[in-house]
Image (tube, rainbow, N blue to C red):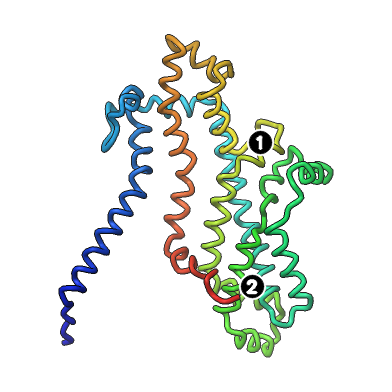
Amino acid sequence: MKKKMKLSFSNRMFYLFNSVVWIVVMLIVLYPLYLVVIASVSDPDAIIRGEVIWHPVDFSLIGYKAVLGYSELIRSYGNSLFYTATGITLSVIVTLLAAYALSRPKFPGKTAINLYFVITMFFGGGLIPTFLVLKDVGLYNNPLILILTGCVSVWNLMVARTFIQTSIPSELYEAAVLDGASHIQFFKKVVMPLSKTIVAVLAVYYGVAKWNDYFTGLVYIKDRKLLPLQTVLREILASLQVDKSGDYMISMADSMESMSEALRIANVSKYCIIVISTGPVVILYAFLQKYFEKGVMIGSLKG
């Protein structure tokens, strides 16, 4: 049996210090998230008095009842799930197809196309020209705008290209060609099965971007039945904090004793909105974490 190497006193002190520092950093990062969760199920008065610090005080779901009572919330939640799932699927497929083409050493026009993509990272047409173009092509007030907008991120494309270049040997392609395989067959039967890590990384990146996108719905969607969750939550938060004359605030004030009671509920509803809006993203990351940890450093490789 191999004997374990005995650490010196200085090494043991270093590991101890390192562990303490990172535990403290972890607590600093996690505590605000924990505070939001316990505040969302605490009594509004306890939050106002600053009593909610380590655990829920006077457990209450009044904030969730107020937020979930908003008539458009459930529909917008379903909309966002559809937009996000469809957007992730389309974005990952298109990104990997483009990344595969750009990873081929003999792809004609590769340098010019790379330059074209990179330019779009630094220069854009602006909101008004973009709005006019999208309206002219029929995407205004069209649910496709929430799926197609941001379909391909140039940064994600470069990360995927680097992964394919560094992780899939060119010898595999040469062997596939000898067997009579085309590019499409090689991509489908070789590249995709070997790219689970980058698929998971892209799914997380695109999923977070799609789920958190409220601005596209705010600018391009007129039909309220098509609004995504984040746009609706933004409206709820704005009406709770600012617009005292909004329909939602009026309905709350009519069902309670006074406007001050509505403001009291609004204080805890802010935390409930954060929990509702971030839940699916946390779940997505939890399922893809093992792949995400392997692929997060891909962009640091050459390419």
Q: In the image, is residue 200 above or below residue 48?
A: below
Q: For the view shown, which residue lies furthest in the right direction?
A: 136
Q: Position of residue 91 (x, y in %)?
A: 64, 58
Would you name the residue on which mark 1 appears? 218
Which of the two discs, 1 and 2, sits closer to the camera? Answer: 1
Q: What residue type is disc 2 on?
A: Lys
Where residue 265 sits in the image (x, y, percent)?
42, 22
Left or right of 45 on screen, residue 107: right
Which quarter shows the C terminus?
bottom right
Q: 10 Å neighbourhood of mark 1: few (<14), some, or many (≥20)?
A: some
25 horizontally vs 79: left or right = left
Q: Residue at x 35, y 48 (%)?
A: 30
* Among numbered discs 1 and 2, the one appearing first in the sequence: 2
Residue nearer the viewer, 166 or 124: 124
Q: Is residue 40 above or below residue 31?
A: above
Kind of residue indicated by mark 1: Leu
Residue at coordinates 71% horizontally, 45% vertically from top-left? Answer: 145
Q: Is 103 in front, or is 11? A: 11
Determine which residue is flagged by label 2.
Answer: 188
**x, y percent for residue 232:** 58, 33
Horizontally, residue 134 falls left or right of residue 163, namely: right
Q: Position of residue 70 (x, y in %)?
A: 53, 26
